[in-house]
């Protein structure tokens, strides 16, 4: 699969790797190079006596290199792929050498072993016992959390800006002790609100009430549908076995990779891939976590491309977060159905809110949106003259405007309620990332 | 509704409670049910109602109906877009953060009458914000879409659309300097007239700066205005004198020549008779001729004569001695004192653009005279530079660095060979700045320039790698716009 230069660069783990990779995208750097339908390989003369052997599995975008770099993919992988993107014709050798075929074979064996491991039955009784004990701990924790929340509403929010960080952190830690890390995270989000910024009260109340809705819902237990129960348990902090999830039947589709967002905290990198089903119109969020220098991401998806894959969704009444069942194959991102305007988006949003009031933002594809300025803010106008604000934090407004030139574009946006952030646009038939 | 909830929460329900009237009509039955439930404490009642209100709010979001948002679309482009290879090259130049390469790219795109694809407009205009010199180019290659965008972004509203005259009359100091320089190069008389019109309003520093620009293409037409200036400030006065000394017809050059005619004459055979009558006329001293020698082995007389010879056209000596150029040079070279004035003749040849004189003077010389170089063709400059490079490596490098055109392969090879053996003086920064002067063919020669000293070899390998990367980007740009 031939990726564009921009798409290859999105695979780089950081800016220095991107630059170093570009520097290696020259013919002179490679002692040998070749490509087959399945793989791409090359030998790059580095500072060592032997050239580094770089290989890329093109079907599922996996990298391997004999260099000592801890970055993944390393600059050699990026460089080789960039060279291939620029000049595929010079990759005239189509027979993989033994070091490439061995690696590809090993990958197949590993995949089979993984499958076998997933097939092993778990010890259900012991697990149930652990779950019951944990349930009790969580319920005790929630009781304390509720008292704390009632104190806040009784005494008023006005005193909150004066509270030190320990006020929030103590309760978050209490939730961690109670084995409810999801609630701990929601409480920490309260402490991150800028109490000196305009409108903090609104932000605070929204997050505060989300916590309240989760614990109320969780306490309802079996009165709710099994799916909703599972989703609430996830929000509280109960995890799902990803291995078990993988065994479920997935939703097969062509998935458009609309964009990737990366955040780093305490050396833990979180990658959020926003996907959209070409035929199912189902949005999906694929999350990936890894510690830089310690572990490698399992999955390399290229924003601006699409994959043929089956996705398994985490249990939810409004499914969004998903796992990708391997194998995946890359393709060009195609044009897809988009909603006709904001009315369709808000109707969908209302329907989602009715099913699950506590939810995160999700991607939509909307036809013919034009960026416009109104009241000193940027908005997106649809073909029915309805306008919706662009998130203040959106940084690529000028790139969007440059692409639009005041003309409407089909656009992938991410958001909820009344703020959306553009993820990419179809410009002259080509999907451009923002 | 939502504000009522937030306001109640702000004060605390110990002070203020929610009532059904605080909620919309749709929620009144819910409110009555919650508030009527005596089993719930007041905090729970508030949290219940607030949670319902939150969901009510988020389920009722609508887009704003607003047909009147004015945004006229960008006009269609008149020029074709550059190709993908050009975009890759631009991205490389931007990634390396090298302004010379970005500028080179902009120039190539501009001369090919092409424009950049829309998504690169913001990054180019952002670069132009801090780099005034590329603003005009950046705006041109950003096409109609760039103009349309810049109208919406205050930072990108460069005064590119102004005419030269408007720039001169209303522009910033740097802008005015730039426009005067451009005009002086193309229309010397017009530049002088513009300056004469605004002269009385200019401050001292602007006057000095603008007069310095008039050094380019200074000529007889400037004389009457220059001689009419009544300046008090010494810096401005010095600059006026500098200009007058550039014009052979000026009274001061004529005065110098009269003095020289009296002081230097042909003696018997090939000897010169050199004798300066002191003290000097006050006007000559005022014009900037210093009377005190700053070198022990140079007499005051020689010091003054050196300056005078450097300020008169060398062709005057031909009629004075009734001899050809070669013979005149020979006369000076043969004389013990006269040979000290050879550099002054070089200065004069350069000052009065006497190319034939310059070529003869630089022939067979083993001394480096950078002031003589600009009049020669690039090839002549490099031949001369090569001949004296081993004695003046850094002076030659400094001179070449100030040139804007591409260096020849031979001199570049010599220069890099020397740099490879002096790795701490010329680092990557030097090559970043001077990438445009490096000829692309040098990339294949770099390995041959590896120094013999083992200690320097690794550094040179890295430097070579860097040079290859830079040159490769330059070649990509050139090829993309072929």
Image (cartoon, rainbow, N blue to C red):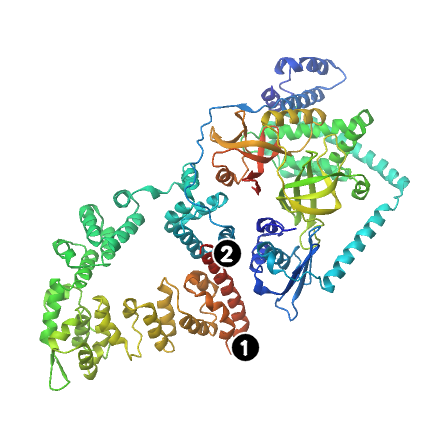
Say which chain tag 2 marks: B
Residue tagged 2: B96
Q: Residue B41 appears in which quarter of the rendering?
A: top right
Instruction: Give me the C-alpha separation between circle 1 and circle 2.
Output: 30 Å
Q: Position of residue A315 (x, y in %)?
A: 77, 34
Q: Residues within 10 Å of mark 2 (few under 14, many from 20)?
A: some
Q: Residues within 10 Å of mark 1 (few under 14, many from 20)?
A: few
* Nearer mark to the viewer, of 1 and 2: 2
Judged left or right of residue B55, residue B337 is left
> Residue placed at 78% from the left, 37% from the top?
A238
Question: Looking at the image, which residue sits at the far bottom?
Answer: B269
Q: Position of residue B198 (x, y in %)?
A: 20, 46
Is tag 1's residue or tag 2's residue first in the polypeptide sequence?
A: 2
Is the residue A75 above or below the residue B174 in the image?
A: below
Closer to us: B238 or B224: B224
SS label for mark 2? loop
Residue tagged 1: B454
SS label for mark 1? helix
Q: Are marks 1 and 2 in contact (CB under 8 Å)?
A: no
Judged left or right of residue B427, residue A423 is right
Say which chain tag 1 marks: B
> Residue placed at 80% from the left, 39% from the top?
A249
- Circle number at residue B27: none
Split into 4 quadrants, where in the image is the N terminus of chain B? top right
> Residue placed at 70% from the left, 34% from the top?
A280
């Amino acid at each position: 699969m031939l990726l564009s230069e921009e798409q290859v660069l999105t695979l780089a783990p950081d800016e220095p790797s991107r630059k170093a990779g570009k520097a290696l995208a020259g013919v002179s750097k490679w002692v040998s190079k070749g490509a087959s339908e399945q793989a791409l390989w090359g030998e790059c003369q580095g500072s060592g006596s032997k050239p580094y052997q770089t290989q890329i599995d093109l079907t599922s975008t996996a990298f391997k290199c004999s260099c000592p770099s801890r970055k993944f993919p390393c600059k050699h992988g990026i460089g080789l792929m960039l060279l291939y993107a620029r000049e595929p014709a010079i990759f005239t050798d189509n027979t993989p050498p033994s070091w490439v075929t061995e690696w590809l074979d090993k990958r197949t064996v590993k995949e089979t072993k993984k499958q076998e491991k997933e097939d092993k039955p778990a010890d259900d009784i012991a697990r149930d016992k652990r779950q019951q004990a944990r349930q009790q701990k969580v319920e005790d924790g929630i009781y304390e959390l509720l008292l704390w929340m009632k104190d806040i509403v009784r005494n008023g929010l006005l005193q909150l800006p004066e509270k030190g960080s320990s006020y929030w952190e103590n309760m978050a830690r209490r939730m961690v002790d109670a084995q409810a890390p999801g609630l701990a995270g929601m409480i920490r989000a309260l402490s991150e609100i800028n109490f000196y910024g305009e409108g903090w009260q609104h932000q605070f109340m929204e997050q505060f009430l989300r916590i309240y809705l989760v614990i109320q819902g969780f306490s309802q237990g079996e009165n709710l549908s099994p799916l909703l129960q599972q989703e609430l348990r996830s929000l509280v902090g109960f995890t799902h076995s990803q291995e078990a999830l993988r065994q479920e039947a997935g939703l097969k589709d062509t998935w458009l990779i609309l964009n990737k967002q990366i955040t780093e905290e305490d050396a833990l990198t979180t990658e959020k891939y926003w996907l959209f089903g070409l035929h199912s119109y189902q949005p999906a969020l694929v999350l990936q976590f890894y510690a830089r220098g310690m572990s490698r991401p399992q999955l390399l998806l290229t924003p601006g491309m699409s994959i043929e894959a089956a996705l398994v969704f985490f249990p939810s009444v409004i499914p969004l977060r998903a796992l990708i069942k391997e194998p995946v194959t890359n393709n060009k991102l195609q044009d897809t159905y988009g909603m006709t305007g904001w009315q369709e988006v808000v109707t969908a949003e209302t329907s989602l809110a009715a099913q699950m009031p506590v939810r995160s933002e999700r991607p939509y594809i909307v036809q013919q949106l034009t960026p416009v300025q109104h009241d000193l803010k940027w908005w997106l106008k649809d073909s029915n003259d309805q306008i919706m604000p662009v998130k203040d934090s959106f940084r690529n407004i000028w790139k969007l405007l440059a692409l639009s030139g005041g003309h409407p574009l089909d656009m992938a946006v991410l958001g909820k309620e009344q703020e959306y952030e553009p993820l990419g646009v179809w410009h002259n038939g080509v999907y451009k990332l923002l | 509704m939502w504000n009522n909830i937030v306001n109640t929460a702000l004060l605390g329900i110990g002070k203020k409670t929610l009532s059904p009237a605080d909620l919309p009509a749709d929620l009144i039955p819910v409110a009555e049910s919650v508030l009527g439930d005596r089993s719930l404490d007041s905090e729970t009642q508030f949290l219940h109602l607030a949670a319902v209100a939150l969901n009510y709010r988020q389920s009722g979001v609508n887009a704003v109906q607003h047909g009147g948002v004015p945004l006229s679309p960008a006009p269609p482009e008149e020029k074709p877009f550059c190709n993908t290879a050009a975009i890759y090259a631009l991205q490389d130049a931007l990634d390396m953060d090298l302004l010379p390469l970005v500028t080179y790219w902009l120039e190539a795109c501009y001369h090919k009458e092409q424009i950049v694809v829309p998504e690169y407009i913001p990054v180019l205009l952002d670069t132009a914000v801090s780099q005034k010199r590329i603003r005009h180019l950046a705006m041109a290659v950003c096409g109609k879409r760039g103009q349309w965008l810049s109208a919406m972004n205050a930072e990108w509203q460069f005064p590119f659309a102004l005419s030269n005259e408007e720039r001169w009359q209303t522009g910033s100091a740097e802008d005015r300097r730039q426009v005067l320089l451009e005009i002086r190069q193309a229309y010397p008389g017009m530049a002088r007239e513009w300056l004469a019109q605004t002269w009385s309003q200019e401050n001292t520093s602007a006057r000095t700066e603008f007069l310095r620009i008039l050094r380019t293409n200074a000529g007889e037409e400037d004389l009457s205005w220059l001689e009419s200036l009544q300046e008090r400030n010494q810096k401005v006065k010095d600059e006026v004198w500098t200009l007058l000394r550039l014009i052979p017809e000026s009274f001061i050059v004529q005065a110098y020549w009269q003095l020289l005619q009296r002081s230097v004459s042909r003696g018997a055979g090939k000897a010169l008779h050199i004798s300066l009558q002191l003290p000097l006329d006050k006007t000559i001293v005022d014009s900037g001729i210093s009377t005190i020698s700053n070198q022990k082995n140079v007499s005051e007389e020689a010091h003054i004569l050196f300056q005078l010879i450097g300020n008169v056209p060398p062709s005057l000596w031909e009629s004075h001695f009734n001899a050809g150029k070669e013979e005149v040079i020979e006369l000076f070279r043969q004389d013990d004192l006269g040979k000290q004035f050879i550099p002054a003749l070089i200065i004069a040849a350069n000052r009065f653009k006497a190319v034939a004189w310059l070529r003869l003077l630089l022939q067979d010389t083993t001394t480096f005279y950078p002031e003589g170089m600009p009049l020669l063709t690039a090839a002549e400059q490099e031949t001369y530079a090569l001949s004296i490079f081993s004695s003046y490596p850094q002076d030659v490098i400094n001179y070449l660095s100030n040139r804007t055109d591409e260096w020849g392969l031979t001199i570049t090879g010599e220069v890099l060979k020397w740099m490879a053996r002096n790795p701490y003086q010329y680092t990557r920064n030097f090559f970043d700045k001077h990438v445009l002067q490096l000829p692309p063919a040098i990339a294949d020669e770099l390995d041959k320039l590896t120094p013999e000293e083992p200690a320097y070899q690794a550094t040179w390998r890295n430097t070579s790698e860097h040079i290859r990367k830079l040159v490769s980007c330059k070649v990509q740009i050139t090829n993309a716009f072929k």
